[in-house]
Image: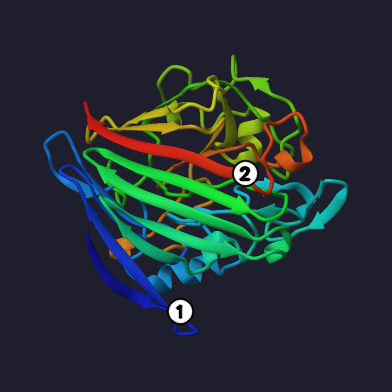
Amino acid sequence: MERKLFGRMADGTPIELYRLKSQQLKAECMTYGASLVSLQAPDRSGKRDHVVLGFDELDGYVQDRRSKSPSFLGSTVGRYANRIAGARFYLEGKEYTLAKNNGANSLHGGPGGFYNVAWKAEEIENGVTFHYLSKDGEEGFPGNLMTTVRYKLTEADLQIEYFASTDSTTVVNLTNHSYFNLAGAERGPILSHRLRLCASRFTPTDAGMIPTGELRSVGGTPLDFRDATAIGERIGAPEEQVRLAQGYDHNFVLDDSSGNLKLAAKLHDPLSGRVLETWTTEPGIQFYSGNYLDGTLCGRGGVRYGKYSALCLETQHFPDSPNQPAFPSTVLRAGETFHSITIYRFSTR
């Protein structure tokens, strides 16, 4: 474990960077957004390389997250990951209006979401824990919410564990928004990566990327990743859902809905031989193929991140669940504890 000053916010708030190391992995996490800044994993020859997108300096993260269309690189997102339609929902008979940052919708908790605030850090064995108190009314959400995010490195696993408690009924949906490229984070498109998802259904969306409420079979569609498939094989298909998202940006309904830790996705890069397994206790996973990366982000080493430069595998509850009573509930009440585990497990083939 190493700790250093990564930079300061405009108001002088110091942002700390924590370096973690296991026998196989190296990671860096920072207090701004409780974010994963870098992750290095070995290829089949044992050579380590960065496998997530990132910036060399704090300013890169601040400028991106405060832009009109942030990319959320590496961040913890909440209170509510993904979209809430119309930036509003009803809870216990009361309407709550949220901050808008995605047209008429709220995305990833709004412009002042968890990705855009400074957290407090605590060193633990093999990792670091981040704490943040989201006060009642922040971005429009009810209740004082105490949130904890714990990063741990063990052998070839990066484990991210989430906890949250509230003093008043609210909604919670937390995830990590890292962008993966197993060939090396600065080495171009991920279209040759092969992906398998443990999901027979997905939640189709309208043109605003809001779920229609249907749980649709992936069978016979370009979204069928039940068998390992190259991401680029069907990404240009004329099918409506792929066309609306300009690629993949969909919530997949995991076949195992028990709430136990289970395999959700398996990603393989034939070039490097790296394999990434995503395990989670969550009911869904958002597969995003980096469709809106357009080369304007100048990342680590001065490399510009273009379309399909990397992909996200965001473990989560479903988008817009507060407005979709048939979806798994994201309601958290006083006296209850939200708890979720995600493991990113690396190997080579």
Residue at image coords 56%, 69%: 66
How far across and how far down the image is residue 44, in percent?
16, 33
In the picture, residue 208 is in which quadrant? top right
How far across and how far down the image is residue 166, in percent?
64, 53
Residue at image coords 73%, 53%: 105
> Quadrant of the image for the N terminus?
bottom left
Between 137 and 177, the residue placed more toward the observer is 137
Residue 130 placement, left or right of 4: right
Q: Specify the amino acid type for callout 2.
A: Glu
Between 150 and 67, the residue placed more toward the observer is 150
How far across and how far down the image is residue 200, in percent?
56, 18
Name the mark on residue 79. Answer: none
Residue 137 placement, left or right of 115: right
Q: Disc 1 marks which residue?
A: 9
Residue at image coords 70%, 58%: 143
Between 83 and 271, the residue placed more toward the observer is 83
> Quadrant of the image for the C terminus?
top left
Secondary structure beneath disc 1? loop
Secondary structure beneath disc 2? loop
Q: Disc 2 marks which residue?
A: 336
Whether 301 is drawn above or below 326: the answer is below
Classify mark 2: residues with Cα within 10 Å, few (<14), some (14-19) or many (20+).
Answer: few
Mark 1 and mark 2 in contact (Cβ < 8 Å)?
no
Q: Earlier in the sequence, mark 2 or mark 1?
A: 1
Q: Is residue 288 visible?
A: no
Label 2, label 1: how far apart the Cα atoms are: 34 Å
Residue 66 placement, left or right of 57: right
Query: Closer to us: mark 2 or mark 1?
Result: 2
Classify mark 1: residues with Cα within 10 Å, few (<14), some (14-19) or many (20+).
Answer: some
Whether 172 is drawn above or below 57: the answer is above
